[in-house]
Structure formats: C-alpha cells, structure tokens
Image: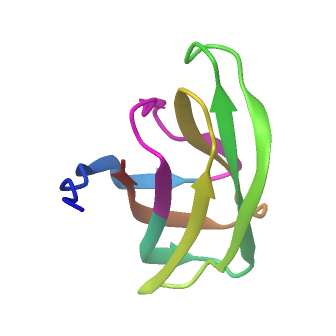
Amino acid sequence: MPTSMRNAYTAVIARGEVWEGSVCTEPYEAAWAGEAVFFVHVTHASGAGVAVARVQISPDGLHWVDEGTQMQFTAQAETLDFARVVNFGGWLRLHVIVPSGVAITVVATLALKS
C-alpha cells in the first residue's frame, strides 16, 4: 500500500520575548495539522519560580478556551520544555503565567504535522 508523505511545519511564535505575569503567544492557525508540539526554551531568567503554560484553542483566533494540556517549567536559563496536543480544531496558542517578581526571556516554537 503506498504511503503519502506527511506535511510538517515549525512556526516561531515568540523569539527573544520577555515574559512576566500573564502572557499569551501569538495565535497560530493550524486546522490542517493533526498533531502539534509546543516548545518553550528559556534563554534567560531573573528571579526564581515555576511558570505554567496552558494550551488554548479557538474556532476563530479571537475567542479562546483552555484545551486541558499544560506544561510547567522552572524559570531558569537554558531550560527546554514541551507540550503535545491532538484534536485541537483550528487555532492554537499558549497562555503563560509567570510568578510575580520573575522575568524570563524565551524562544517558543510550534511544530505541526498532518
């Protein structure tokens, strides 16, 4: 049985951004994809604590609801964490809560596959 090649795409959704308090990444339209992996690479951190990133989904890129997947990561330089999601509909983003008094500089990417 012939197999078809899967489509894959990686989007940078935050590059060199400083996250403090409550932050949302740029929304990304991904209706064509069957699976997604968010990566958050902390490149610099001031303060200490654990940040929580929740995956959010949307039918239109304007109205958001928590999908249920989340990642927790230490606000410490050179950490890399990820979260996997499937069956997410059309739009994706991360909503991140960084502890008070903590600032992290990040590179966040979204890897998509059909």
Instruction: Locate residue 100: give its quadrant.
Output: bottom right
The residue located at (46%, 33%) in the rendering is: 26
Tally the marks: 0
Q: Residue at x 48, y 61 (%)?
A: 37
In the figure, is residue 94 to the left or right of 34?
A: right
Task: Read off the magenta span.
Answer: 20-38
Q: Is residue 88 left or right of residue 39?
A: right
Residue 42 lies in magenta, yes or no? no
The image quarter in which residue 82 lies: bottom right
Residue 36 locus on image (x, y percent): 48, 54
- Quick one: 45 or 90, which is closer to the camera? 90
Q: Position of residue 92 (x, y in %)?
A: 55, 37
Near-viewer residue (6 or 59): 6
Residue in the picture at 77% in, 64% down = 99
- Tell me if 108 is positioned left or right of 57 in this view: left
Quadrant of the rendered structure where residue 22 is?
top right
Residue 37 counted in the magenta span: yes
Give the x, y percent position of residue 76: 55, 85
Q: Decide if residue 54 is on the left or right side of residue 11.
A: right
In the picture shown, does residue 38 fall above or below 44?
above
Residue for point 58% across, 13% down: 60
Q: How is the image coloured?
A: rainbow
Quarter of the image where the N terminus is located: bottom left
Q: Where is residue 13 in the image (x, y as percent from the top left)?
A: 37, 45
> Is 90 above or below relative to 103?
above
